Amino acid sequence: MLTQSAHAASDRALIPGYRQPAHDKAGDWLRQCVVFVGVCAIVLPIFWITLTAFKLPKDVYSLSAAFNFTVTLENLRTVFEHPWNLGSKIVNSLVVATSTVLLAIPMATMAAYAFSRFEFRFKKTIFLVVIASQFIPAAVIVLPYFLMFKQLGMLDTRSALVLVNMSIVLPYAVWMMKGFIDAVPVEIEESAMVDGAHRARVIWEIVVPTALPGIITAAVFCFTLTWNEFLFALIISKQDALTLPIGLIGFRTERGDLWELMAAGGILITAPMFILSLLVQKQFIQSLTAGSVR
Amino acid sequence: MTQISLRGLYKSFGATQVVRDLNLEIADQEFLVLLGPSGCGKTTTMRMVAGLEQATHGEIAFDGRRMNEVPTQSRDVAMVFQNYGLYPHMTVAENIGYPLKLRGINGADRQAAIERAADRVELGAYLQRRPRELSGGQRQRVALARSIVRTPKVFLMDEPLSNLDAKLRVAMRAEIKHLAYELQVTTLYVTHDQVEAMTLAHRVAIMKDGVIVQLASPEEIYDDPVNTYVAGFIGSPPMNLIEVNAQASWANAENGARIEVAAPRQGPITLGIRAEDVQLTDMDRAHFSVEVFAFELLGDSTLVTIKLGQTGVTVKGDKSLRLKFGDRVGVRLDPAHLYWFESATGLRIR
């Protein structure tokens, strides 16, 4: 033992400048400040919108009524009335987002499986093209879309919005899901094949359940993207297929911005996402930590 | 009741040839072990039998029927993987029952078969657990139970014990041996552990660089190795291989030690001798004397390592033997148990 520790001491002496790192207290403090500022930047606007949604119009601009105001549910009622009609817009948003996810996720799962498991020519290039399609600014392709749907007589329809949203969402979903499927050990697929399962059954009974947390994560992500999508909905929908985010600009009127109504609409947009994310939080964390605990 | 024939089997991955002209007949109910270091092509060979890899050339046949084009799921083989290959989202019972589910066996029949298989590997109490709640040994049992829940044509086992700790490995080895005896299904077993090969196999195929070097019973492989590769792989400790320069009636070791044995030819030659055939004796009977390099107690015996130049030689000693570093011992090589190999090629000289 003695000779061993003597060895260790002399080894250290051989490394010039060897020094045990000290505890950096200033760094700790700085890190906490950065985190605090970051949290404020995210939470305060949401907090402010929530307050505004329950204010009377006269209290909205009043600093003295910033926290001390009469609570009203009037705004949440008004937004459902003529001319705002947020109800039909919520239905549109729900239909478009749900349909997009229901179509995109199975397609993305199959594409991701192919990219993850099969070898084929130009695989890397094709995958790169799929990802790169996301780098094209929406503003560049919105006009061709508009003209195409006009030709097809699909302007101002939910189907058109679903198609457009699929084009936005699919590359993300394929890319995310390839990662999740990569993490499923090939061995369990081979195991299932030896046990007697065909490829389709292997995917349905083994790969999908194992990658389910990831698939749910991708689905939520796609739903959120579609739910919040603004530019395409603005150009393609006009009256019948208007979605919630477009409904919000209606509150900018000639009489000025109706902040209390916009805030109430904002809550209606945010709340479903908030509830959805609470519901899938467990899955989400599971999928993020998968692999590290396996 | 399946006989496996591998004829002129080749497998390449790109430019790398992993298996080269492999010919092997595995008899019905035989337990055949493919033994070799990692990268020797043994797992690839097994995967070709399972249909998980396609042979580049050659034929795989079960009972004379060509299987190359038959997909994995139709070959009716069962396989135990090194990492168990359990389905993480299914319970133990569902894992074991999956092959039956795929064959349309449902309800009480399936349940009964699952319980029978689970009891056989003593897993009855764990049927409702998920794989992540089990220890490594238990997971391996689930994999075994899943493979015996139906009676497949062929069992394939890919290093099934190498992820287990040493103690468990010995216990599971005995269980696998017993299962093979009970079930009497043709088994192909892949391992890099020569002890597993020696204990389990009816016949062992030792592989190197994609080729079978020797195919024989464990006894024959131990007693009659064809080259230094096999001799150095089998046995624990493996055979001592000493480079010597042979003269008319004696041979000189690297450090100049003179060994009074008659070699089959003169010049550089490799002398092989097993640790149990090297004797530690008094100086007048010894071939040479040398200092002890290391002395190890094993409980039932002792191991003494001596050095002839750079070459370590292991000697198996009596359990009561006690030696210290630097003790001088007389060494005698039992002339009746010497093996001779060509130094250049490693091939046995008979």
Image (cartoon, coloured by chain):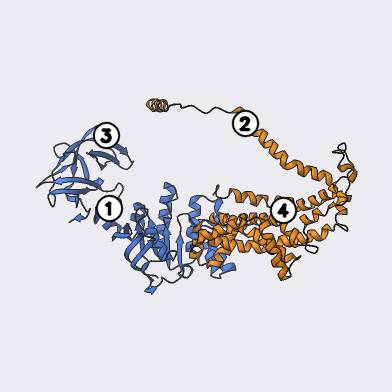
Chain colours: A orange, B blue
Horizontal and vertical percent position of residue B256: 16, 39
Residue under label 1, please give it.
B229
Q: Are marks 3 and 1 in contact (CB under 8 Å)?
A: no
Q: Position of residue A19 (x, y in %)?
A: 48, 26
Upstream in sequence: badge 3 or badge 1: 1
- Type of the residue with mark 2: Asp
Chain of the residue under the numbered disc 3 shown in the image: B
User: Cα distance, mark 4 to mark 2?
Assistant: 34 Å
Q: Are marks 2 and 1 in contact (CB under 8 Å)?
A: no
SS type, badge 2: helix
Q: Residues within 10 Å of mark 1 (few under 14, many from 20)?
A: some
Return the residue at label 3. Answer: B323
Q: Which residue is nearer to you in this view: A252 or A130?
A: A252
Q: Secondary structure at mark 1?
A: helix
Whether B72 is drawn above or below A225: the answer is below
Q: CA–CA distance between discs 2 and 1?
A: 60 Å
Q: Amino acid at mark 1?
A: Tyr
Q: CA distance from mark 3 to mark 4?
A: 73 Å
Residue A231 visible: yes
Residue ID for mark 2 = A28
Residue A276: numbered disc: 4
Q: Nearer the viewer, mark 4 or mark 2?
A: 2
For the residue marked with disc 3, what is the amino acid?
A: Leu
Measured along the vertical axis of the image, is residue B134 above or below residue A38?
Answer: below
The residue sitting at 35% across, 60% down in the picture is B17
Please name the residue shown 62% across and 63% down the image: A106
Comparing labels 3 and 1, the label whose residue is closer to the camera: 1
Q: Is residue B92 left or right of residue A266?
A: left
The answer to whether marks 4 and 1 mark residues whose Cβ atoms lie closer than 8 Å is no
Label 4 sits on what residue type? Leu
| Residue B312 percent across, percent down from the top left | 25, 41
Q: CA distance from mark 3 to mark 1?
A: 31 Å
